[in-house]
């Protein structure tokens, strides 16, 4: 048996990989919103848990969504 | 031929068929540069996430078309001259049909199942994001990232 973990271990699982989601669309803003902070900033990978590939896709699509005024750049 | 999706926001305060007139201009451009329109997805009037040219609402339309690879550039450079178009963006779709349900006109929750049988992320690649008046800042929220966030707990799957 392993010793008890101190604190909670953060599972570094990429939700996209788990769900086998391969397409991320900038129009799916509800999904993308989970990867931004309250103020609309893109959450870093260590927080989102995304793998590099999906983090890149998320970032790219959040930027597209912002351009199309579907998401804010940053709330004041 | 490559498949593209062009998102267009037209100002919402045009009289009568003003919107249709603007969209016709864009459809004509697509046609002119060898594109074939495959699908038109109308989201309709919608509150924008931030005002553009002091307007809070825009009319959103997404046109899927296939065309030669040079087409988007030509179409975009001319779309930029259409005053009533507030924003546009062309992305590549390749063979991917990302099925995304258009959220309701208001910015309420929309269960957008971003599910597509199989595809690769890269397949939705930006063609050229032009006409942007954004301070392209590669910002990532470092602060306010609660140092110890539990994983986004069980997303009711
Ligand atoms: Zn992943």
Image: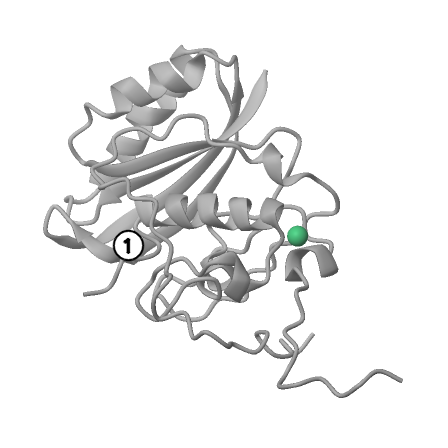
| Quarter of the image where the C terminus of chain B is located | bottom right
Q: Chain of mark 1?
A: A
The residue at the point 35 percent across, 19 percent down is: B75
Residue with the mark numbered 1: A73
The residue at the point 30 percent across, 50 percent down is: A69
Left or right of B114, for residue A32:
left
Of the pair B140 and B3, the residue shown nearer to us? B140
Residue B81 position within the rendered picture, expressed as x and y whole percent measured from the top left: 19, 23
What residue occupies the far right of the structure in this picture? A1
Residue B28 position within the rendered picture, expressed as x and y whole percent measured from the top left: 35, 19
What residue occupies the far left of the structure in this picture? B54
Residue A2 position within the rendered picture, expressed as x and y whole percent measured from the top left: 84, 82
Figure label count: 1
Asked if residue B80 is positioned above or below residue B84 in the image, the reply reads above
Left or right of A29, for residue A74:
left
The residue at the point 67 percent across, 39 percent down is: B120
Left or right of B54, for residue B40:
right
Residue A10 position within the rendered picture, expressed as x and y whole percent measured from the top left: 63, 74
Asked if residue B29 is positioned above or below residue B154 in the image, the reply reads above
Q: Is mark 1 within 8 Å of ligand 1?
A: no
| Quarter of the image where the N terminus of chain B is located | top right
Asked if residue B67 is positioned above or below residue A21 in the image, the reply reads above
Q: Can residue B123 be seen?
A: yes
Give the secondary structure at mark 1. loop
Of the pair A46 and A22, the residue shown nearer to us? A46
Badge 1 local density, few (<14 within 10 Å), some, or many (20+)?
many
Of the pair B132 and B107, the residue shown nearer to us? B132
Q: Can residue A19 be seen?
A: no
Asked if residue B41 is positioned above or below residue B51 in the image, the reply reads above
């Amino acid at each position: 048996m392993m010793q008890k973990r101190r604190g909670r271990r953060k599972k570094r699982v990429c939700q996209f990989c788990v769900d086998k989601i391969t397409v991320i669309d900038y129009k799916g803003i509800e999904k993308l919103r989970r990867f931004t902070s309250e103020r609309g900033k893109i959450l870093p990978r260590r927080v989102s848990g995304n793998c590099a590939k999906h983090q890149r896709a998320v970032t790219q699509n959040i930027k597209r969504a912002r351009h199309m005024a579907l998401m804010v750049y940053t709330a004041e | 031929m490559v498949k593209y999706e062009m998102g267009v926001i037209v100002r919402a305060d045009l009289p009568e068929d003003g919107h249709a007139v603007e969209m016709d201009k864009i459809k004509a451009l697509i046609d002119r540069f060898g594109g074939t329109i495959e699908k038109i997805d109308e989201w309709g009037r919608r509150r924008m996430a931030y005002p553009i040219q002091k307007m809070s609402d825009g009319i959103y339309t997404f046109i899927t078309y296939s065309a030669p690879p040079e087409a988007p550039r030509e179409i975009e450079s001319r779309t930029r001259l259409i005053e009533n178009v507030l924003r546009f963006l062309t992305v590549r779709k390749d063979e991917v049909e990302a099925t995304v349900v258009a959220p309701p006109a208001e910015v309420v929750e929309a269960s957008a199942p971003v599910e597509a049988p199989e595809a690769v992320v890269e397949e939705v690649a930006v063609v050229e994001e032009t006409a942007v008046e954004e301070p392209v800042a590669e910002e990532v929220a470092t602060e306010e990232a609660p140092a110890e966030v539990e994983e986004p707990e069980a997303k009711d799957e």
